[in-house]
Amino acid sequence: MDGGRLRYQPGLDGLRGLALVAMLAFHDSRLQGGFLGLSTFFTLSGFLITGLLLSEWGASGRVSLRRFFGRRSRRLLPAALVGIGVAAVVTAALHDGQTSLNFRFDALSSLGEVANWRFIVSGRSYANLLATPSPLLHYWSLAVEEQFYLVLAPLIVALLALARGRRAILAGALAALATASYVDGWLLVRHSVDRAYYGTDTRALEFLIGALVAVAISGRQFERWQSRAVATVGTLALVGLVWGTVVARVTDAGLFRGGLLAYAFGSAIVVIAACEPGPVRALCSLDPLRWLGQISYGVYIYHWPVFIWLNHARTGLGPLALTGARMTTTLALAIVSFVFVEQPIRRGRRLTGRKGWIALPAAAAVAAATALVVGIAAPPLAATFAPAESQASVLRTARHELNTTPTTSVVTNGNRSATTAVAPHPIHRVMIVGDSVALTLGRGIERWGANHGVVVLNDGVIGCPLLNGVDVRGYWGIATRSADPCQTRTQWPKLTAEFKPDLVISLYGAWDVYDASLDHSRTWTSPGQPAFDRYYTSRVEDAVTRLQATGARVLWLTPPCFAANNGSLDAHAPWYDPARVEVLRTIDHRVATRAKVTISDAIHDAGCPVNFDIRPDGVHFSDSGADTTMATLGPIITRMGDGS
């Protein structure tokens, strides 16, 4: 260490390269635990940043936070801003209204370094990366890193000043923060894996482990036996990290109950080993890995928009050729960015002095304006993915109704009646559950309810399947689904207890027509095959049982057929086969008959084949399409209110 600078370690660049390979393989659906490469980045970042601060403090007795954040800005902002521009181009090329509208807020939150909280609030799941594609989804990790820098750097400087440079006090404070982050993750993952995965508070653990190791070894010179021990243990740790990338799953709550803690410690050991003579340093110092590590930031920035755009449907390429095209394009962009944007600015050859202070904010303003233009120029939405009335507003209306006298209007032959005595089983409140198809149809049910004196709570959820707890293979690649990704086991009892629905309408199927693996991607099965049918039957039975437990009547709607639109997806993909929908319909009927649940084929019959006037994207209902469909569905609800 010299003058606030750390001695260059080529092995650390190579370690970045290895971690990046894991991440790219994960996003290319080739390594299910490759997301852990990002954890190694976090730990390495905490180690390096803390080491730099300690080095500067040791050299001068002070730390210039102004220079520190200036260096970080020159290192990170240029490529990040260009990356937003690339993502804007991809978003416009996708010509998808919802993606374009989302891009406005995705880009602005990325510029504000709060993208992770944006994706938490909007319910974007990291496990279903391509199910709800945002070309800026990967910026969540950049936001976490920058937020951590904003807190860690001043904290370390303050602690060093208060403790007069005593490392023990600094280490104790960092250990306390790491413990708090670990406990926080343990508690939060019970409610939402995505909240724990995206949260700065929960992911701080990995940075803090790196920071603790930096405090422990900063300024120390290992003796020969210690160096050999580090090399040996580091080799074993690296094997453990590789094993983790093979077996880990992004939906596993165990990540926040010791998994990420163990992985962060393993990464920290490998970081040290990459700086000491031995197998780890030899591997990580190989030129290809070291070179990849040097451009890793740009590769990470550009790869995700490239991966979204280059898919099988658009290119017609097979798996290996597609991977090659994605990697080649990404590397080309990263190299150009590194040579002509990142290095000149970082090394001070461009935008020096006042120019830098003016140019970077100006570029950020241009990026923000671009995001707004992309949103304004968005093509018309095929469907609107939000309830017509917010759940909070509906629940207030329901509470008011429940607290008034029982003389209320009810549905009976489509007319309003002044007393509940008119109908033997009056329907005052209807709750809708299901996926995004249910959500968009539910908007029509909401409007129908407003015209018939019925309060409607629309709880359709984007990307919500019944085919849970398995690996699923679809247009996005392979995704691992948790046992309850939509938290229906907590959400349904909570809403039904407060809303007290008289009728629950259920519609699933859009996310259930895909191939499934019941043995962790070793073998695959699909609708119509015995293993799939048995498993899906158990999922439908579970949902029906839980809905019946609410005490409300249940109307189970069988799913319509689905089709690709605008050539954006492979129209001949097996999941668009109407035979798969027919299998789901048959299972629905079998379960409903045994459970004595009312079931209707109204949506299925009207939606096979697909009527693009009703469902413009081949999947979801437009508002006018949902209203048209209520001409058929409305009388069915009315008859249930009449008790007929």
Image (cartoon, rainbow, N blue to C red):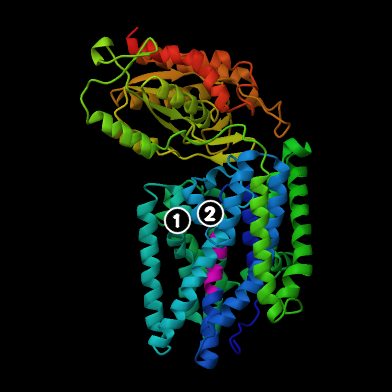
Residue 78 vs residue 3: left or right?
right
Query: Type of residue at label 2?
Result: Gly
Task: Determine which residue is flagged by label 2.
Answer: 244
Residue at (62, 35) in percent of width and height: 381
Residue 528 position within the rendered picture, expressed as x and y whole percent measured from the top left: 56, 19
- Disc 1 is placed on an element classified as helix
Quarter of the view holding residue 19? bottom right
Residue 398 position within the rendered picture, expressed as x and y whole percent measured from the top left: 30, 31
Position above or below: 518 against 183: above
Task: Determine which residue is flagged by label 1.
Answer: 259
Question: Which residues are the magenta region?
Answer: 39-47
Dominant SS type (magenta): helix
Pick the front one: 248 or 147 = 147
Residue at (28, 11) in percent of width and height: 423
Query: Type of residue at label 1?
Result: Gly
Residue 447 vs residue 4: left or right?
left
Quadrant in the picture for the N terminus: bottom right
Instruction: Name the mark nearer the viewer: 1 or 2.
Output: 1
